[in-house]
Amino acid sequence: MWYWKVVHSVRCYFDKYIGFYSFPPGCQPGFFGPDCFEKCIDTCNGCNNFNGLCDYGCIPGWIGYFCNKECDKGSYGIECNGTCGHCRDVKQCSNVNGSCLTGCDAGYKGDLCKSQCDRGSYGIGCNETCGHCRDVSQCSHINGTCLTGCKAGFKGDVCKTDCDGGSYGVDCNKICGNCLNESQCSNINGTCFTGCNAGYEGDLCKTECNRGFYGYECNETCGHCRNKSYCFPINGTCLTGCDVGYEGALCKSRE
């Protein structure tokens, strides 16, 4: 009994002053201490038999001599060397593997939210489709803004709105021609889908009828105008009067 007390006192002395134990060899893995009753912390990769220090490092997500401190917010992994991605809430980035537990910020995808949306998509979950961007590769993966502007016929930051009625083209800065129905003017290239008003011809209906013709599709022939250049292209009226021997607004009746 006296011998055990002396040995025990020596062991305690060394523990207090120089941190050394004279233990019996080999605790079971996961335990430490004089009688191997102390359990290593679960976040250790393995602790030593003497004082429980995590000599072999921590499992991912934990740091400290005893692996009892989580990675700081925004970091994760072995020795907290990983940087969290674009999590919707960085506080919800797993300290273990970096997974974004509540999803990604707009414009990003994947478990770690480090991958941008595929070209042509944007927003939360990358579930929005880019509009009519002039260059789809210049569609913001975050909010869909077309960074280099819209294709012909569209307007707005995301280029999803047609030009207003009566305009068309790049930046909607061109005016539709004399379409038979203004709403039937292509917002992209100005083509009049239903034809031209009387007096005009061509796809855009911006060209007056050739001299001597008037009406719809310019298929009417001017009368005996004194000057055919003054035959009104819309209804054929002779603006400077008739040749000798003819009368009427269209100068098609003999006197």
Image: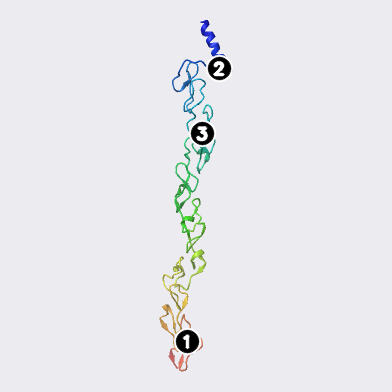
- Residue ID at (51%, 33%): 79
Q: Position of residue 101 (x, y in %)?
A: 47, 39
Q: Please determine whether, in this image, residue 7 is positioned above or below residue 42.
A: above
Query: CB under 8 Å between callouts 1 and 3?
Result: no
Spatial separation of the CA atoms under disc 1 and disc 3: 92 Å
At mark 3, the secondary structure is helix
Query: CB under 8 Å between callouts 2 and 3?
Result: no
At mark 2, the secondary structure is helix
At mark 1, the secondary structure is helix
* Badge 1 or badge 2: first in the primary sequence: 2
Q: Residue type at mark 3: give it.
A: Glu
**Which mark is in front, 1 or 2?**
2
Q: Estimate how packed mark 3 is, as few (under 14), some (14 to 19) or many (20 or more) residues with alpha carbons within 10 Å.
A: some
Q: Which residue in the protein does label 1 denote?
A: 228
* Badge 2 or badge 3: first in the primary sequence: 2
Q: Estimate how packed mark 1 is, as few (under 14), some (14 to 19) or many (20 or more) residues with alpha carbons within 10 Å.
A: many
Q: Which residue in the protein does label 3 denote?
A: 79
Q: Position of residue 175 (x, y in %)?
A: 50, 70
Task: Please tell me which residue lies in front, 241 or 153.
Answer: 153
Q: Residue type at mark 2: give it.
A: Asp
Q: Which residue in the protein does label 2 denote?
A: 15
* Badge 1 or badge 3: first in the primary sequence: 3
**Which mark is in front, 1 or 3?**
3
Spatial separation of the CA atoms under disc 1 and disc 2: 120 Å
- Residue ID at (51%, 31%): 62
Q: Estimate how packed mark 2 is, as few (under 14), some (14 to 19) or many (20 or more) residues with alpha carbons within 10 Å.
A: some
Q: Position of residue 7 (x, y in %)?
A: 53, 10
- Residue ID at (59%, 17%): 17
Spatial separation of the CA atoms under disc 2 and disc 3: 29 Å
Q: Residue type at mark 1: give it.
A: Lys
Residue farthest to the top? 2
